[in-house]
Image: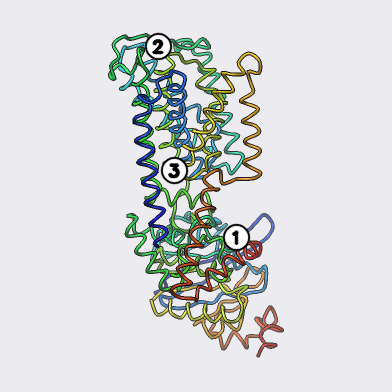
């Protein structure tokens, strides 16, 4: 008990220090490249956390999340360019469109198990890319340039003099996504999603309507992905089917979460903090010479994670925590009651009984 | 008044008749033993009642409501919980989390579900392993965890599929004591079991399945002397241990 309280306090301390650092970051580091990289890390943290809701907690690996990202980006952008309505309002339009589409894609696809679900989402992603490439009203394959609006105001969702505005907007979005994930993790839906991931039959036998909860998860996931899509459009000020609906986007969302550790709150953020700078630096330093090198790095990472650390980096952290807490428990046990036979037994025989079951 | 009423239940898998015209009822408060040799159709029958298979023919009534062909989740919501022959614990979740998943059915708020889960863990004597990751448990504890998780859904009728298979004698005795305590709580149970020594003193009534058909339905003492049952199944096993 005491050791878990200690780790809890440590977690809060880390969170507070991190929050203070993130709030001060644009004042501490004024180089544009660093600020841009940091904005991308935060953006990908949001995307990783959003993907994690369905891919991590519910264990339904989607490789079509670019659909929701693209729909978020396109909806707010088209609403802005066609009707001159604020992207902040367009953002909610994007959320509605993405949520509806996610339910339409999810409902039939959730009947497919394991790899087939992933394949179905890849196919759905390609359908959207082709559709938008051929949809002339929405800019076709050329894409859409967003109109430049001067005035450095939050209401415009555009900043040209300094990137502070973008930085604090995406930081706030990350905070909201983290809060949502925290609440999901602590409530019935989080427990149910994990149960569905672990064993769908057991989940059903406990009264869980697994299709309905998977739909909740993908709809939540799509909503946050769409918000990030609107941010991306406003940040880059140019979108096209080949960028926002790209399969690579979907893969990177998945990879960020998997690298850091799926089904955890910190995992996707850690994943983004490692992967994005790596991708940016290889892109900048090897530009022209080896353009696709960061893709090679992704490939290697996927292989290494799946072979050596399927739990991601958070899996490593957990292993250390467990080692600490058992050591602490042993100390407590040695002082108080010597009989802790269950603890000893579980350590010794865990893998053996696994095989028998 | 029967709690569960099964009429003419038939389940075919292509040409294979797994369950044929099964008539069976379970009265409130009783422990019904369901036995039969391997392949008799016991687990198929379980799966037809609990919604994992749609029956080919027949009707199932529970508490005056027809539940034939309902999905597993609806059957559970109606008040029938089950365990699995091959244990299905939620491996990467702790013991407490496993039971909370069950408790959430009747207690949507996390704090309430946790309280209910702790109560069930106390009752099933799993309280001191509650923070362990459930994949690390022994087989006996995993089976007990499955039972605890099912109990957390507050069932009126509990189906236990070979809850005592693979347990050593001490663990079996603990499991028998647990079943007796559950009965004192007013929970009606159907036990599928291979271990005859366990089922005979425990059950109020025993139904014997053979090749998908009911061949006997009687009190344990009469089952033990029933000619057809001895022929089909009990022969060597029960007499040898007598």
Q: Are marks 1 and 2 on the same chain?
A: no
**Which residue matches tag 3?**
A265
Quadrant containing the C terminus of chain B in the rendered view? bottom right
To the question of a shared chain for discs 2 and 3, the answer is yes
Q: CA distance from mark 2 to mark 3?
A: 34 Å
Between B63 and A182, the residue placed more toward the observer is A182
Is the residue B143 above or below the residue A193 in the image? below
x and y, in percent, of residue A331 in the image: 48, 67
Relative to the observer, which residue lies in front, B71 or A3? Answer: A3
Is label 1 on the same chain as label 3?
no
**Quarter of the figure with residue A28:** top left
Task: State which mark lies toward you, 2 or 3.
Answer: 3
Residue at (41, 58) in percent of width and height? A4
Report, in whole angstroms, how far the alpha carbon at label 1 lies from the one at label 2: 62 Å
Q: On the image, numbered disc 1 is attached to which residue?
A: B11
Mark 1 to mark 3 CA distance (whole Å): 46 Å
Label 1 Cα crowd, 10 Å radius (few <14 / some 14-19 / many 20+): many
> Looking at the image, which residue is at 39% across and 55% down?
A6
């Amino acid at each position: 008990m005491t050791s878990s309280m200690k780790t809890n306090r440590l977690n809060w301390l880390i969170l507070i220090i991190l929050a203070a650092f993130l709030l001060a970051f644009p004042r501490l580091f004024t180089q544009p490249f660093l600020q841009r990289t940091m904005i991308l890390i935060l953006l990908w943290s949001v995307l990783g956390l959003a993907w994690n809701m369905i891919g991590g907690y519910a264990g339904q690996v989607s490789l079509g999340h670019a659909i929701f990202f693209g729909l978020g980006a396109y909806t707010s952008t088209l609403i802005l360019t066609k009707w001159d309505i604020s992207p902040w309002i367009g953002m909610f339009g994007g959320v509605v469109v993405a949520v509806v589409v996610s339910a339409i894609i999810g409902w039939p696809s959730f009947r497919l198990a394991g790899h087939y679900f992933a394949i179905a989402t890849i196919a759905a992603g390609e359908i959207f890319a082709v559709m938008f490439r051929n949809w002339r009203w929405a800019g076709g394959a050329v894409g859409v340039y967003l109109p430049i609006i001067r005035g450095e105001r939050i209401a415009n969702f555009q900043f040209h003099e300094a990137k502070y505005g973008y930085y604090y907007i995406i930081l706030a979005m990350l905070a909201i996504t983290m809060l949502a994930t925290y609440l999901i993790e602590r409530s019935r839906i989080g427990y149910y999603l994990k149960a569905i991931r672990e064993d769908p039959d057991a989940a059903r036998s406990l009264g869980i309507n697994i299709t309905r909860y998977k739909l909740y998860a993908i709809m939540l996931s799509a909503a946050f992905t769409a918000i990030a899509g609107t941010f991306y459009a406003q940040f880059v000020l140019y979108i096209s089917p080949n960028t926002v609906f790209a399969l690579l986007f979907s893969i990177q969302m998945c990879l960020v979460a998997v690298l850091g550790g799926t089904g955890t709150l910190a995992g996707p953020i850690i994943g983004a903090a490692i992967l994005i700078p790596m991708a940016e630096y290889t892109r900048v330093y090897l530009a022209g010479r080896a353009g696709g090198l960061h893709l090679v790095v992704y490939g290697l990472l996927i292989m290494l994670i799946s072979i050596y650390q399927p739990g991601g980096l958070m899996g490593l952290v957990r292993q250390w925590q467990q080692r600490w807490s058992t050591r602490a428990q042993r100390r407590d046990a040695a002082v108080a009651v010597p009989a802790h036979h269950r603890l000893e037994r579980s350590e010794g025989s865990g893998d053996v009984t696994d095989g028998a079951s | 008044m029967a709690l569960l009423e099964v009429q003419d239940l038939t389940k075919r898998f292509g040409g294979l008749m797994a369950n044929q015209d099964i008539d069976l009822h379970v009265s409130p408060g009783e422990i019904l033993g369901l036995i039969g040799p391997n392949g008799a159709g016991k687990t198929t029958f379980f799966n037809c009642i609990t919604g994992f298979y749609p029956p080919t023919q027949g009707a199932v009534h529970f508490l005056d409501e027809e539940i034939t062909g309902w999905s597993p989740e609806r059957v559970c919501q109606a008040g029938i919980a089950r365990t699995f022959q091959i244990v299905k614990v939620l491996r990467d979740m702790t013991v407490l989390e496993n039971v909370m998943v069950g408790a959430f059915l009747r207690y949507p708020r996390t704090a309430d579900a946790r309280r209910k889960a702790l109560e069930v863990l106390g009752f099933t004597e799993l309280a001191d392993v509650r923070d362990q990751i459930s994949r690390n448990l022994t087989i006996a504890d995993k089976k007990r965890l499955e039972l605890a998780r099912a109990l957390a859904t507050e069932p009126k009728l509990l189906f236990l599929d070979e809850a005592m298979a693979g347990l050593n004698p001490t663990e079996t005795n603990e499991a028998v004591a647990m079943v007796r305590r559950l009965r004192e709580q007013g929970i009606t149970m159907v036990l599928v079991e291979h271990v005859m020594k366990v089922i005979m003193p425990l059950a109020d009534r025993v139904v014997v399945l053979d090749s998908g058909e009911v061949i006997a339905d009687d009190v344990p003492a009469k089952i033990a002397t029933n000619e057809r049952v001895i022929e089909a199944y009990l022969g060597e096993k029960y007499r040898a241990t007598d």
